[in-house]
Image (cartoon, rainbow, N blue to C red):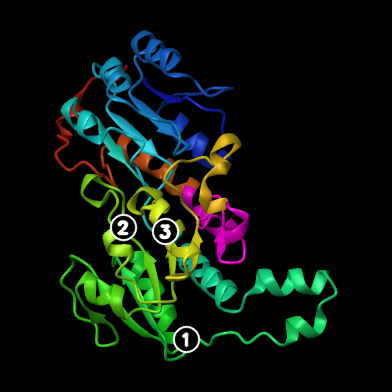
């Protein structure tokens, strides 16, 4: 019988749980296992598949090595999978699956929530109103999006949805992407041109070695004077420290961040200068929840479980390490 491990406390949808259990023994821990506990369990109990719920749960080479004799699949409950050493997983012939495209609408909508909050100064207006500054607040003039230019870096499903929404607002759309596609409504340009021309820049690229600090200091300084930057992708693709300097000196007018170079953000990490009081009116900061709507979360958990079911039935899907050899499906059940 297949043995499947969830090394964290999590509620799995009842129907999906029963479907997984029809293939084997599902173990859901009542607490998050630390590295030593997980390594011990993988060696002792010889699990065939593992389900990871939290993006902050690091699956290292040591963990994968401990399970390499029997572990053949990891299902990640997210689109991003930079918490998993995928190269090591491939070395040990362990398939890694993610959940793509479940939050396309949710993230794209968050992008424009941030843009609108910044251009209409919603934080400042509410603060003025609460302080009894009615007339002062009414004197404020916001910015319309129609006729402005949005630069979209990355043209996956979310990037495309952001482009579509931008056109509904009457915006000019510039796109920088490695994908060679033709769309009459969008202009595909190089990164330097996009940064110099865009009133708004929105990041939609995954984090990999080649995208670490993709918007570094040199590139951030090329942005149009008074532009606004939105990052709902990954914190490590952006140089936050340089962004802070450019916000303070007014080169960049505002920023909306849902992701950060270090996560989660609490305790001492909140002393990060992006949280500086002097930037309060210039930034919208959210705790990596752009994806989080009821519809998207329901879809996320369904696909997370479906990936396991598909693998156990011999038809893996949403595989992120294509070098994986399907011959492992011939391994005898535990």
Q: Earlier in the sequence, mark 2 or mark 1?
A: 1
Looking at the rendered structure, which numbered label has been put on residue 243? Answer: 3
- What's drawn in magenta, residue-wise? 276-300
Q: Earlier in the sequence, mark 3 or mark 2?
A: 2
Percent coordinates x, y for residue 323 in the rendering? 14, 39
Q: In this orientation, does residue 232 appear? A: no
Q: Nearer the viewer, residue 110 or 7?
A: 110
Which residue lies at the image location 35% right of the left edge and 62% below the top edge? 204
Secondary structure category for the residue under label 2: helix
Q: Is residue 324 above or below residue 209?
A: above
Is 329 on the left or on the right of 243, as rendered? left
Q: Nearer the viewer, residue 3 or 160?
A: 160
Percent coordinates x, y for residue 159 in the rendering? 35, 68
Mark 3 Cα-neighbour bin, 10 Å: few <14, some 14–19, many ≥20? many
Which quadrant of the rendered structure holds the N terminus? top left
Looking at the rendered structure, which numbered label has been put on residue 217? Answer: 2
Could you say which quadrant of the image residue 313 lies in?
A: top left
């Amino acid at each position: 019988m297949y043995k499947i491990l969830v090394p964290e406390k999590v509620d799995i949808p009842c129907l999906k749980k029963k479907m997984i259990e029809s293939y084997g023994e599902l173990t859901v821990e009542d607490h998050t296992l630390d590295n030593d506990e997980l390594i011990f369990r993988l060696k002792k109990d010889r699990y065939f598949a593992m389900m990871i719920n939290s993006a902050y749960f690091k699956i290292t080479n040591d963990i994968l090595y401990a399970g390499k004799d029997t572990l053949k699949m990891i299902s990640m409950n997210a689109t991003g999978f930079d918490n998993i050493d995928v190269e090591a997983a491939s070395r040990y012939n362990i398939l890694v699956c993610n959940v793509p495209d479940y939050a396309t609408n949710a993230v794209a909508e968050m992008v424009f929530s941030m843009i609108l909050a910044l251009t209409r100064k919603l934080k400042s207006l509410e603060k003025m109103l609460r302080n009894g500054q009615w007339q002062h607040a009414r004197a404020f003039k916001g910015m319309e999006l129609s006729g402005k230019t949005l630069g979209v870096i990355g043209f996956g499903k979310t990037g495309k949805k952001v482009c579509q929404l931008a056109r509904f607002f009457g915006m000019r759309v510039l796109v920088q992407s490695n994908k060679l596609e033709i769309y009459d409504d969008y202009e595909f340009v190089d990164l330097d041109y996009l940064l110099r021309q865009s009133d708004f820049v929105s990041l939609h690229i995954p984090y990999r070695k080649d995208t670490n600090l993709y918007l570094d200091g040199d590139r951030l300084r090329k942005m149009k004077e008074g532009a606004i930057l939105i990052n709902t992708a990954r914190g490590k693709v952006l140089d936050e420290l340089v962004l802070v300097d450019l916000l303070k000196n007014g080169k960049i007018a505002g920023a909306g961040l849902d992701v950060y170079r270090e996560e989660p953000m609490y305790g001492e990490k909140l002393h990060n200068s992006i949280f500086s009081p002097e930037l309060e009116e210039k930034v919208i900061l959210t705790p990596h929840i752009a994806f989080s709507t009821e519809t998207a979360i329901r879809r996320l958990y369904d696909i997370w479980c479906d990936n396991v079911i598909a693998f156990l039935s011999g038809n893996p899907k949403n595989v992120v390490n294509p070098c994986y050899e399907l011959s492992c499906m011939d391994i005898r059940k535990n």
